Amino acid sequence: MTSISKLTAGFTSTDVYRRREPHAFAYLSERATFWIAVLSVFAFITGNMIGQHGWVVFWKSVMGESSEATIVFTGMTPPITNVPDFERWRRLGGDVRTHTFRQVPSDLLITLPRYTRHRDDVAGNPGLRTVYFTEHLGTYTTGRGEGSHPGTDISTPEGTPVVSVANGIVVRAGNDPGGFGTYIVVKHPNVPDVEKKGEMSAVYSVYAHLSETLVQEGLIVSKGEQIGLSGRTGNASAPHLHFQMDRESAPFHPYWPFTGAEQRQARMTFAQAVDGGLGRANAERNTLDPMFIVQSYEEYVPPVVARQESSSSSVQRRMTTADRRMVRLAKIRTAAVSSIPATLVAYTDNASIAPATALLPSHSSSAPAAAGEVKSVRISHDGSFGRERGWERLTLMLLDGDGRLVVNPSSQDKIRMQTAYGRAEFKPPVVPLTDFRNGVFTVGMLPLGEQTVVVQVQPTQDISKPMKYVR
């Protein structure tokens, strides 16, 4: 068979789908885009890794842990819960300059007194001035508001637990040896403006002269959560907490109203500059009276919660998905452990705790663990509270991995109290394991409002069964 070409046959053919080879420039442009994308990703990762906490903050932002949108303002609480009754403590030989907070007898601790400015203290309370020895815009000499001190100095022994005054995010945790010493700055977003009704703004709380910090930058903290211990670091003549509150408009945090150059130009020492009111206008413009602001919001109830709680008692308060999840987790945890009979925990103080074997969960072995590592903390309460009852009693029990009571913990860690749902104050908010008697300790809890309260302890993250409000 012979083949005939298409030209001989008298016809031509055309491809229906014409195949085109890519132009050399198109090929190179595709490769350039690829390498630009690679370099962009590399630059992005490198940029986020620069800095002390850059990589940590980056991943927290990705996971949604450091977003300010998740922080809800729920009021404020004082930065210190308890201080010594200084007059009684002195009579027993106590000295704030040489003794620590742990050395103060528990029966000499009192709730931090209510702050009153010098000009409003008509009774001339000397005990109050002992605690708040320098007020906002005060002087070091008299403490009165005639200088440029931007914060309030609260006298307290070294090692006093310091808590965040409101929900917020830690933006600074550093050390200023010649000034603030070891300090923490917490940003509190969406705070109702006390001067401009109806407007919201951010404030920055400052905790200075600390002996120890318990948080790092980028961490979200809750109101009343312990963040450090008071001390005497930096420019401090005695142990105390320098508590300050900066406005959002302040050019930096923590803010100070005058610079070293301005002080030298005025030919003043540091104390003379404060007493002489150097930079007072700057302090007035960029800082707030911190204890006054805290006390203004101690009874604050978020608008949404206020509307829900003011509704009829027959209508159940609407809970968010996160709220339902926390209550559900509490029920799951407590369902696995039988409750302790109320008769076994009806004691008046930690000195009269019932024998450890009597307090063991019913499913545990017959004898407690004499010593061991604490794996979980059992939280027990009577299940309800009312407005007239005041402080509630929580019983904490240290358990090992087998659910046995740990009478002698092998570590010296601390248990930190907080709420997983609802609002409450704790006394004390932090309990060293060494303070447990026979593996048991009693904590006072004051519910705030009428919400159900679910208690959580750190670092084990154990939570209690819900404590409901009973009208």
Image (cartoon, helix red, strand yellow):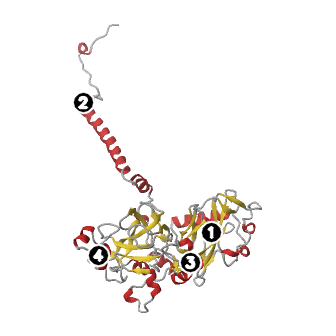
Residue closest to the eye, 204 or 110: 110
Foreground label between 4 and 2: 4
State the residue at coordinates (30%, 35%).
Answer: 31
Q: The disc labelled 1 sits on which kind of residue?
A: Asp
Q: Position of residue 440 (x, y in %)?
A: 67, 68
* Left or right relative to 330: residue 321: left
Question: CA–CA distance between discs 4 and 3?
Answer: 43 Å
Mark with earlier residue (3, 1):
1
Q: Position of residue 35 (x, y in %)?
A: 31, 38
Q: The disc labelled 3 sits on which kind of residue?
A: Leu
Foreground label between 1 and 4: 4
**Residue 124 in view in this figure:** yes
Q: Are marks 3 and 1 in contact (CB under 8 Å)?
A: no
Q: Which mark is residue 435?
A: 1
Question: CA–CA distance between discs 2 and 3?
Answer: 76 Å
Mark with earlier residue (1, 2):
2
Q: Which residue is mark 4?
A: 273
Q: Secondary structure at mark 3?
A: strand
Q: Which residue is mark 3?
A: 446
Q: Are marks 1 and 2 in contact (CB under 8 Å)?
A: no
